[in-house]
Amino acid sequence: MAKKEKEKLWEFKLYIAGQSSKSVTAFENLKQICEKYLHGKYNIELIDLTLNPEKAREDQIIALPTLIRKLPTPVKKIIGDLSKTHNVLVELKLTERNGVINEG
């Protein structure tokens, strides 16, 4: 059980609008960040609001693309294409060395 706790899974929802350039860029940037810092210990749920507009209510989405970090808690929300990697890392509390910034 201790091993599973150390290998916690990060859960993300990425709300996008079809294949717009911002949507594609946001997804690519998120994948790169996750691969570099979370080493496969993540799950991304991609939600296209052009196909499922009713899903916007669930997480109160008002702009696209929007990233929601569900786990670990607390929930975090980032709006934009995630191109400012440093800002995304700070918001998600990630570091290259240990995968997680001290939540302090």
Image (tube, helix red, strand yellow):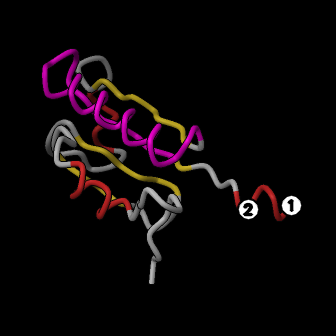
Dot 2 amino acid type: Glu
Residue tagged 1: 1
What residue do we see at 26% from left, 26% from top? 49
Q: Are marks 1 and 2 in contact (CB under 8 Å)?
A: yes
Give, as a single range, the part of the protein colored magenta. Answer: 11-40
Spot occupied by residue 86 in the image (x, y as percentages of width and height): 23, 56
Spot occupied by residue 71 in the image (x, y as percentages of width and height): 52, 56
Please indicate whether residue 5 sits to the left or right of residue 75 in the image. right
Residue found at the very far right of the displayed protein = 1
Magenta segment, prevailing SS (helix, strand or loop): helix
Circle 1 packing at 10 Å, graded few (<14), some (14-19), many (20+), is few
Circle 2 packing at 10 Å, graded few (<14), some (14-19), many (20+), is few
Dot 1 amino acid type: Met
Spot occupied by residue 18 in the image (x, y as percentages of width and height): 22, 17
What residue do we see at 46% from left, 48% from top? 37
Compared with 90, 103 (above or below) is below
